[in-house]
Image: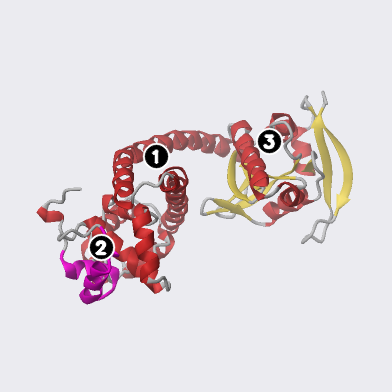
Amino acid sequence: MATSPSSALTLAQVAARAEVSPGTVRRWVKEGLVPQYEGEWTPAAASHVRIVSRLRERGHTVEQIREASQSGRLAFGFIDELLPTSDGRYKLADAVRVTGLKAEEIERLVAAMGLSVLSVDSISEEDMELLRYVAAILSAGLPVPAFLQLTRVYAQAMAQIADAEVRLFHLYVHEPLMRDGVPGLEMTEEMEALVGEMLPFVSPIMNYLHARFLAHFVEQDVIGHIEADLDDGIAEEGRMRVTVAFADLAGYTRLTEEAGEQEALGAVERFVETVEQTLPIEARVIKTLGDEVMIVGSDPVALTDWAVGLPASLPAGSPPPRIGVHHGAALYRDGDYYGREVNRAARVVARAAGGEVLVTRPVVDMAAGLDGLRFELIGGVVLKGFSEPTELFIASSVEG
């Protein structure tokens, strides 16, 4: 890949980025550990030096690194030259002066983003531009606690997206090229070209999805405010009434032992995909943990009706799901829901058998008089972590 004079780096810059001495970089070049170096320090060659440095820190030998470079196992690392980076030029005091943000606000922001690699005493042009955006948002009137929560949600979501991009690219592009025996440098060029064509479309796709989901949740929030006015009201900040459902696969551990991890993982993937495709419009998956899915919605009747019909939507041969549904007040923080009533919902599903949907009294009360569902009282059950009994019901379809 041709490099313009403005993009060429000095040996000192390459060594500093890799946190080694210039002499060490020269030695690695002589030992054949940096195949991209051809008399000029390109971003790709500099990226490879950083990778070599990290591998040496972890105890890998020169021979192992040389073989990995030649086989193409390190090829994916060169792609970071396509991503915007710059050296840290500013200190924390500079950022405070330029943006008007307080030092503690910047430090809290960095912590909320989870960017341990970003030092507040080594701030780049990109970092400074971000801080200017933050200052503008806070000046517009958004409270700092709300912005920090929003930042944590953004950071967690983007970390998951970036992790998926790298892992899926590795599985479906990098690994096949290695299996085909493509030489290391040729593999690097192929992957670099593919990523270069793909990157310009990532932001438009994310912007499109964000706008669509934002419109959806604005509508749900308006409806929720109207329904809250009809409710008894919840005074505590951040607390709201929601319907929480937990769903998992009965016998998942046994399936892992009998059919193997790959087959069990396939069953979980099909289960989660079916859940996401069939949920009521006002409900969404909050998180997954192994084979368990946590779902939150505003309508307990719709969510219970969905739960009762879920087994029929699953692929043939799938392990039977078990589901617990509860309606109550939960505390909203950082894109997730917490509190006693969420814990209660999690305990409810633990009492369900395969193929069962268990619900609590608040769900039954809100579904009273509606057609299509019936509820069979089990009785008061003392759930783990609760001193008082919780009335549980088996929900089923009237037609079933």
Whether 30 is among the magenta residues is: yes
Q: Which is more N-terminal, label 3 or label 1?
A: 1
Amino acid beneath label 3: Leu
Magenta residue span: 10-35
User: Can residue 72 be seen in this snapshot?
Assistant: yes
* Residue beneath disc 2: 100
Q: Give x and y (percent) for residue 288.
A: 61, 49
Left or right, 13 with reference to 196: left
Magenta span: predominant SS is: helix
Circle 1 sits in a helix, a strand or a loop, which is it?
A: helix
Q: Which residue corresponds to the image point at 83% horizontal and 58% vertical from the top-left?
A: 388
The quadrant where residue 119 appears: bottom left
Q: Which residue corresponds to the image point at 30% horizontal and 65% vertical from the top-left?
A: 33
Q: How many marks?
A: 3
Amino acid beneath label 1: Met
* Residue beneath disc 3: 303
Circle 3 sits in a helix, a strand or a loop, which is it?
A: helix
